[in-house]
Amino acid sequence: MVQSEEREAGRDGPEQSQKASDRVEDRGSRHGIARMTVADVRALVAGAPPEPGDEFWKALESDPRKGVRAILERLLRARSRRAAQRHRETSMRALEADVWGAGCLLVAGVDEAGRGPLAGPVVAAAVILPRDFEVGEIDDSKKLTPDKRDLLFDRIRNEARAVGVGSASRERIDEINILHATFEAMRGAVAALDDAPGHVLVDGEAVPGLGLPQTGVPRGDERSAAIAAASIVAKVTRDRIMIGLDAEYPEYGFARHKGYGTPEHLAALARFGPCEIHRRSFHVVRESEGGLSELYALFRSELLGSEDTETLDAVARSIAAEKEKLDSYELGRLRGLYRRCYVRLAAGLAPR
Amino acid sequence: MNTRKSGAIAERIAACFLALKGCAILERNYRFHGKEIDLIALEGERVLFVEVKFRRTRQRGLPREAVDRRKRRRIIFAARGFFSERGGRERACRFDVVEVMLEDGGRALRAEHIVGAFDEGAR
């Protein structure tokens, strides 16, 4: 009798209570990961990724170890990234989808490249994407690395319903100014499409004289897949043209800056003067041509060097005193520069 | 008698004490990745995480047993691990201390159950 009592009480103290222990378990099974190392948990997750709500997921949520929390964090971030990408597949086609909904089948996106540079042509592209096109990494060409751009360029040319490219030469830009030349290039790109679109989405402002229903889309190259695709085609096409021209005019570094006004380009311009492909109608090009007088250069630096409005006005008065020595172009430039410097100095900023 | 032995004995005494009060003992020396809890017990529906302390002499009548911040963090960590291991739902729980002391020059044994010595909020 005594013996059995002893056994019940346990010689080392109260028995661990199994029934009570069961009450602290959840209906679900005891989960394995608690005794696993973080590295093993990571491997398990990699092999069989859990979904929110299942037992494995709940075990990850309740585990206090930092390493396990980090694994959960990674899973959550990956899920939200995938969700965002899924959303993007829809949102980037939304503008086109609206047009399809209205009954129009072929929608083209249009964008240009090369409006800003000091040399070379301006290039525009028009792209019609098929309805089931996967947006993937298609985005504004400016947001992509050159390598990504090249890859996407190939994909667009393989998968697009139609691609058209148009351009305006440097001479044409000098003739009719860059804005009109860009429009010409865009009209050319649309005309070059094998299939005529029913509607055109243009980055920025609508194109005059296009002859087709169109919508100007502000920041269209970020918002619409078709326009973004066009921006990629235009940029890559133009970049390759400029790399080709680098062989003919090696002094300027066209292969690197594609004609944009980088420090390297400006230095080369100052040193060698402009070449055949520089846009003479652009002010920066003109100023390096040497057709401008020393007096102009002097006044220009005096205006920019003025520290207050009184000094600025003194410079203005000395310009007025010598105005016969300057041509109308130079006077116009100095006048504009005076105005801009005045505004900046009056506001308390440095002149440039 | 070294401290480890007396600590172990104190833990058994504390377990008996809690059992006498009607608690069920769930775990002894529960370990979760390097962090330990001396005793896990069930009082009704509430889970008790108990730290056991053995004292040879009563030091100036210390009313509360202070568990230092580091130990507290470790106990809380292990408590979370305990719930996680058993299905993940955290339930009503409490962090207690049982002090086991020799008194009266070694003539008496005293065990004191300090309820709610700290809580999760206090990091």
Image: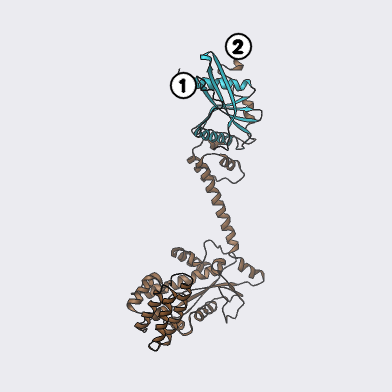
Chain colours: A brown, B cyan
Front residue of this view, candidates B4 and A104? B4
Q: Residue furthest top?
A: A1
Q: Position of residue B42 (x, y in %)?
A: 62, 28
Q: Position of residue A51 (x, y in %)?
A: 59, 46
For residue A3, the mark is 2
In the rendered view, tell whether residue A173 sits above or below residue B9: below
> Where the C terminus of chain B falls, by quadrant?
top right
Q: Residues within 10 Å of mark 1 (few under 14, many from 20)?
A: few
Residue A277 visible to the viewer: no
Chain bearing tag 1 is: B
Residue drawn at point x = 38 percent, y = 75 percent: A245
Q: Which residue is mark 1?
A: B3
Front residue of this view, candidates A280 and A229? A280
> Where the N terminus of chain B falls, by quadrant?
top left
Residue A329 lies in quadrant: bottom left
In the rendered view, tell whether residue A128 sits above or below residue A299: above
Front residue of this view, candidates B97 and A334? A334
Q: Is residue A314 left or right of residue A47?
A: left
Give the Cα distance between marks 1 and 2: 32 Å
Q: Residue furthest bottom?
A: A324
Residue A102 visible to the viewer: yes
